[in-house]
Image: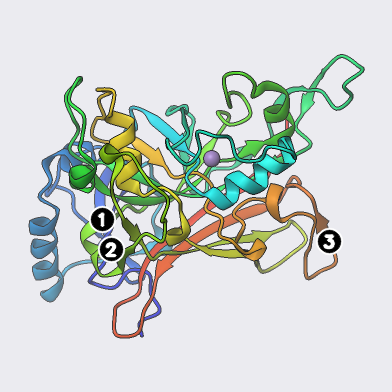
Amino acid sequence: MNTTDFPIENLPFGVFDADGEPHVCTAIEDNILDLHGWLPEPALNAFMASGDVVETKQRIRKLLDTNAELIPMRDATMLMPVRIGDYTDFYASIHHATRVGAKFRPDNPLLPNYKWIPIGYHGRASSIVVSGTPVKRPNGQTRDDANAPPTFGPSKRLDYELELGAFIGRGNALGTPIAANEALDHVFGFCLVNDWSARDIQAWEYQPLGPFLAKNFATSISPWIVTLDALEPYRVQSQREDPVLPHLADDVAFDITVEVWLRSAKMNEPVRLSRGNFRDMYWTVAQLVAHHTSNGCNLQPGDLLASGTISGPAKESAGCLLELSPIELPNGETRNFLEDGDEVILRAYCERDGLPRIGFGECRGVITPAL
Ligand code: MN
């Protein structure tokens, strides 16, 4: 079995810094192939809307058969691959929703709407950053003592959330919903998403309108978009058995292993904190798209729909510290939440005997001190 994330069967799309100019590119093993002149630039949006991914990949494979000039990936600086117009974050793992809900509402963890509508909120597109961008600890208002006024200062409960994001390819006109059984035709591909979350700010601000400043200070994404044709062999049937309204009927899940790694400032090598699988999500990607557009809301090429924290039934598969902590690191350090200097690394890949491994690369971010 291959060990690279980027065999010739994958060919994800990204954008790198070519001497100050954004160039569209693809990844092949440890290298990148400059696609400047092939596809519209400076971002992937126009290509994502056009839908000719399979034909483009055939042309790339032909070129790779000859004497294509490759650039070592370690020498390249990756840029934001897409101009993201709108960003929505969902809450599609019932395991995450139940465990987190129990922390905020011990007697009533799962709200009655959860099994009927995919819960989500509109996030902030302009603070989405590409992997490698440092993340400054946010200041915010928190209330630790219910009998005292709130205070303002650096978050003390900074967390990561392991998610996958679906990039919209072809959009829909305002007023024209996307049917669940056609929804994946509107998805260009997936990336890794770290929805950094300040839990203390979130706990004080979230009612009644949901997350706001606890989330919108930064969201990190991986630089590579893995397209749906590459994930085709890893489509599986969703395990969900509960009833669903007809306009949300869909059972297409994806068998994608997802991992969180952490490297503190005192550690040389990162350590794995958790491993889960995207197939354990309660809501499928097609259901998220169908629900989002069911009222006529329009999605546009380059919009990002993130899944919500990917947590499985086992605690070792929990995709955030709120569910995992307290944890002990191999060097004796302990963590309830992230400390300054901690680097969080998200990884995802599909692997099965007889099939090529298809990986997503990494989504990294280091926490820097609050101002
Ligand atoms: Mn989230």
Q: Which mark is residue 282?
A: none
* Quadrant in which residue 294 is drawn: top left
Give yes or no for contact between labels 1 and 2 (Cβ–Cβ under 8 Å).
yes
Query: Considering the image in quadrants, where does the C terminus appear?
Result: top right
Q: Nearer the viewer, mark 1 or mark 3?
A: 1
| Residue sitting at x 68%, y 37% | 108
* Quadrant in which residue 233 is drawn: bottom left
Q: Which mark is residue 227?
A: 1
Disc 1 CB within 8 Å of nearest ligand 1 atom: no
Q: Position of residue 77 (x, y in %)?
A: 41, 51
Colour convention: rainbow
What whole-number distance in Å separates the C-alpha atoms at marks 3 and 2? 38 Å
Q: Position of residue 291 (x, y in %)?
A: 33, 34
Near mark 1 (Cα within 10 A), the count class, few <14, some 14-19 or many ≥20, is many
Label 2 sits on residue: 231
Label 3 sits on residue: 333
The answer to whether residue 99 is seen in the rendering is yes
What whole-number distance in Å separates the C-alpha atoms at marks 1 and 2? 7 Å
